[in-house]
Every structure is written in C-alpha cells, then in structure tokens.
Amino acid sequence: MKKTIALLFLALSSAGIHAQENNESDYLLFEGKDTTFCTITVLARSAGNVSDIEYYDVAGEKHKVDRKEIKNVKSLRVAGISMDYVPIKASKPDKYKRHIEIELNGKIIVYNHTRIIAGIDQNGDRQLYQVVGAGAAIHMIKLPDGNYYDYKESDIKKYVAPYMLKFKPFADSFKEPISMRNIEAAILKYNELGE
C-alpha cells in the first residue's frame, strides 16, 4: 500500500513538473482571493458542470475543493486550457452559470463549452479528455463592458460589430464588414490593438 502511494505521489509530482516546464501552470482563482498556482489532477464534470476539483499546491500538498465551493472558482486553468465561471445563456447573465472554456482571450473573450475534464491515467500521468454529453452547447462572446452575446450572426451584427467599430484604431485597420465569416479574425485584431 505504501509503495502504491509513493508511486502515485511521484507520478503526480512529475506531472506537475512537466506542466511547469511547458509553461502550463495551472491555477484556481476563487472569488475574492489571490490566485492559487497548482497542478490540477482531477477536474470532473456532472451534466456539464464542474463537480470535482483536486490539486496539488506549490508545496506539494493535496487539496480537494468542496463541492459547495466550486461555484466560487471564478476562473481556472488546467494544462493550458483556461475556463471562467460564466452564464450558460447570454440573454440571462445572472442565471445558471458554468465553467466554460476560453477559445479566444483578451479584451473580447470568446467562450466555447468543449467539456474538458482531467484525470490521472494508469501510468500516473495527467490526461485531459474532451467529453460529449448532456448539457447545453455554449458558444458566446463577452465584450469589455461585461455583456455577453451569442456567437451568431444576428448578435454579431447588432451588438458585437458596432461595439468593436467604436474603437478607432480597430475601425481604421479592419476594413471588412464584420460577420460570422471573419469574427475571430476581427476579435484577434481588436485584442491585438487593445483598448
């Protein structure tokens, strides 16, 4: 039994070292607290919601986030994939929130719920898995003013494009009409120019 625990600890330590060497430092950001840098070894979902989080802190101590506290994890990153705790419906920002993966990060953020989970495989290596299953398909845009919009043509034309075009450096450099076809290129340019 002691051998198994020692081997598991060594495997988890090497997973943490591997993540740090690849500049993939994991972190948890709890509401109202400082960022906790760590190595997340378990990230489980139930019906699309994050249900379990286990991690090793920088001192090598193991922690498990209480299920009631998971909703207080405002943001997290596991193996280079960042997630924020955001509404699942852009039209209802104060209802039903979930940890959703960030597809594009910057002043304008694009979220795409790909349902990432993490665990330790039989060799003791941390693995990420993409799961398909229950839960809403969520793809939305968050503007710097804090408003969320669905990633669809009507919201892009009515809300996102006009907001972006108010920023003169962006409007002067991006001359194409903004649509679903080029929204990611437009957001990348906007984020590059900053505001």
Image (tube, rainbow, N blue to C red):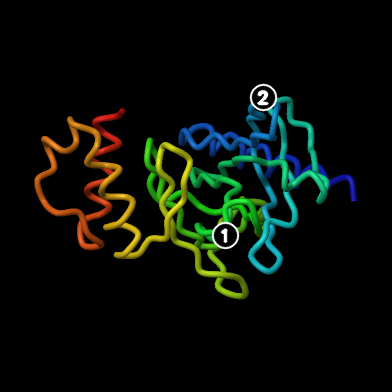
Q: Nearer the viewer, residue 90 or 60?
A: 90
Instruction: Give me the C-alpha separation between circle 2 and circle 1.
Output: 25 Å
Q: Which residue is depicted at the point 22% across and 49% down?
A: 185
Q: Are marks 2 and 1 in contact (CB under 8 Å)?
A: no
Which of the 4 quarters of the picture holds residue 45? bottom right
Which of the labelled discs sits on residue 34, or is there none?
2
Q: What's under tag 1, amino acid-wise?
A: Ile
Crowding at mark 2 (Cα within 10 Å: few <14, some 14-19, many 20+): few
Label 2 residue SS: loop
Q: Report x, y in % for residue 5.
A: 83, 46
Residue on which the image places disc 1: 88
Does residue 169 lie above or below 129 as drawn?
Answer: above
Q: Is residue 142 left or right of residue 188?
A: right
Instruction: Where is residue 95? Give x, y as percent.
Output: 65, 56
Count of all numbered marks drawn on residues in the image: 2
> Badge 1, how many Cα within 10 Å: few under 14, some, many 20+?
many
Residue that protrudes farthest toward the bottom in the picture: 133
Pick the residue in front: 184 or 169.
169
Pair 2/1: label in front: 1
Q: Quadrant of residue 163?
A: top left
137 sits left or right of 125 in the view: left
Q: Earlier in the sequence, mark 2 or mark 1?
A: 2
- Residue 22, numbered label: none
* Image position, residue 61 (x, y; %): 78, 32
Tag 1 secondary structure: loop
Q: Is residue 22 left or right of residue 192?
A: right
* Residue 77 sits above or below residue 94 on the image: above
Q: Quadrant of the C terminus?
A: top left
In percent of width and height, residue 69 lies at: 79, 44
Q: Amino acid at mark 2?
A: Asp
Task: Check the image and report above or below for 163 versus 133.
Answer: above
| Residue at (17% x, 30% y) in the render | 169
